[in-house]
Amino acid sequence: MNIDTQGSNQQQNLGSTEAARSSRRHFLEIFLGTSIVASLVSFLYPVLRYLVPPKQTELGPDLVIAAKVGELRPNSGKIFPFAGRPALLILSADGKYHAVSAVCTHLGCTVQYRPDLHEIWCPCHNGVYSIEGANISGPPPRPLQAFDVIVKSDDVYVQRPQNS
């Protein structure tokens, strides 16, 4: 009986050792599999964010008072807030108002009007736009967003274009 008891104890010990080994192996498989998946996600997420940019929500009013008539001299510009972002109002030398977004389409820098060149200039990477917002030179990939200008009594209003 003593021998049978030892044999059955050894079999029980073998069974519990194999169960513990199997349990550890299962844990390691899950741990390594989860680590691989987490690594893949951490590599692919930035690529997907680059390929599918987030939708930009337009916040703020569609019509703002940008300036008073007479506030700008001919061939000058003024930066004003429009829908939570800077915009640029320009009174050209011929007396016509132009309004564009003041956010460069290259890296989001704030552009400024250069009266000496009659152009809009981005100081970050020397991007140049026309006073209508069209690209002239430099790295910016797209033109500046243009806005409509309305002069009513003493106020100069800027609004989003009606067709967008």
Image (cartoon, grey):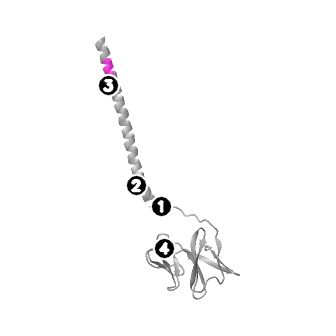
Q: Is 58 covered by the magenta stretch?
A: no
Q: Position of residue 120 (x, y in %)?
A: 51, 80
User: In the image, is residue 85 above or below residue 14?
Assistant: below
Disc nearer the start of the sequence (4/1): 1
Between the residue at mark 4 and the residue at mark 1, the CA separation in whole angstroms equals 18 Å
- Taking the view exactly as shown, the residue that stands out farthest to the left is 3
Between the residue at mark 3 and the residue at mark 2, the CA separation in whole angstroms equals 43 Å
Q: What amino acid is at disc 4?
A: Arg
Q: Is residue 47 left or right of residue 134?
A: left
Disc nearer the start of the sequence (2/1): 2
Q: Which mark is residue 43?
A: 2
SS category of the residue bearing label 2: helix
Disc nearer the start of the sequence (4/2): 2
Q: Residues within 10 Å of mark 3 (few under 14, many from 20)?
A: few
Disc nearer the start of the sequence (4/3): 3
* Residue designated by label 4: 142
- Chain part drawn in magenta: 7-11
- Taking the view exactly as shown, the residue that stands out farthest to the bottom is 94
Q: Is residue 104 left or right of residue 15?
A: right
Q: Nearer the viewer, mark 2 or mark 1?
A: 2
Q: What amino acid is at disc 2?
A: Phe
The residue at 52%/78% (across/down) is 112
User: In the image, is residue 115 above or below residue 37?
Assistant: below
Q: What amino acid is at disc 1?
A: Val
Q: Position of residue 160 (x, y in %)?
A: 61, 73
Between the residue at mark 4 and the residue at mark 3, the CA separation in whole angstroms equals 72 Å
Q: Position of residue 45 (x, y in %)?
A: 44, 55
* Residue designated by label 3: 14
